[in-house]
Image (tube, rainbow, N blue to C red):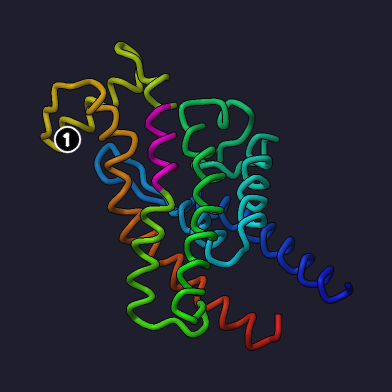
Amino acid sequence: MRGVLGRGVVKLVLASFIAGLTGVLAQVGFNLGPVPYTMQNVGVVLAGLLLPLSYAFISMLLYLTLVFLGFPMGAGFQGGPAVILGYEGGYFLGFLLAAPILSLMSRAYFRLVGRDLTTMKGRDFAVLVVVCAVSTLPIYLLGFIVFSFYAYPGSSLYAWSLNVDNSLNLKSGNPYLTLFVASALIFMPQDFLMDHVIGIVIASALSRLMHFRGV
């Protein structure tokens, strides 16, 4: 019983650490033209790869709760109910789905091949990149849906979306396609090829460290 409780405490501490780290990573970013990018998704990947399904959910729920309560852990040091309930709310809700889905999918894969993060090979890394991409799709879907609700014609968000569309020289002409590009599509390359890759590398290194220390 003590061993079970001990492992539960370790997982809860790790979930809390990842929640806090996600808030830090939300402040690490850069702008490419009119588009702001952050490293926030690294935290989602860490939660999904390092924690069981329920604890991955708890980690992201804790992060959202802290932002909701006013802790400046959203992108740009933002916090408060308006952040969670605003145009970025869909992305936050997506975190609650993406991390558990990634946990479920990655663990199913490792059981299938008989390996884990401490013994993974090069091809496992490639598979995890794909698994991360698939499991984080709810972030972009919910992000687009909520963003579209706020980015109505005449709003500043809609004007920004048109600016993004013009900067990419897409000239889609379809307002929903314009909003999808601005709220989801433009973020995918950076997330898939940078955030997810970094998250996998860190998760593997932390997993090896915890294994070495008998955690």
Point out the residue furthest to the right here.
2
x and y percentages locating residue 144 in the rendered image = 37, 31
Q: In the image, what residue occupies the spot 36% across and 64% down? A: 129
Point out the residue furthest to the top here.
154
Looking at the image, residue 149 sits to the left or right of residue 31; the answer is right
x and y percentages locating residue 104 in the rendered image = 53, 59
The quarter of the rendered structure image containing the N terminus is bottom right
Q: In the image, what residue occupies the spot 79% across and 66% down? A: 9
Give the residues drawn in magenta, as a range.
137-145
Q: Is residue 68 above or below residue 205?
A: above
Q: Is residue 106 above or below residue 147?
A: below
Q: Is residue 174 above or below residue 124?
A: above
Q: In the image, what residue occupies the spot 73% across and 61% down? A: 12
* Residue nearer the viewer, 143 or 31: 143
* Crowding at mark 1 (Cα within 10 Å: few <14, some 14-19, many 20+): few
Magenta stretch, main secondary structure class: helix
Q: In the image, what residue occupies the spot 46% across and 65% down? A: 199
Is-magenta flag for residue 128?
A: no
x and y percentages locating residue 96 in the rendered image = 56, 44
Q: Amino acid at mark 1?
A: Ser
Q: Is residue 27 above or below residue 65?
A: below
Looking at the image, residue 168 sits to the left or right of residue 135; the answer is left
Label 1, secondary structure: give it: helix
Point out the residue furthest to the front here.
112
User: In this view of the protein, can residue 20 be seen by the observer?
Assistant: no
User: In this view of the protein, can residue 164 be seen by the observer?
Assistant: yes
Residue indicated by mark 1: 167
The quarter of the rendered structure image containing the C terminus is bottom right
x and y percentages locating residue 150 in the rendered image = 42, 19
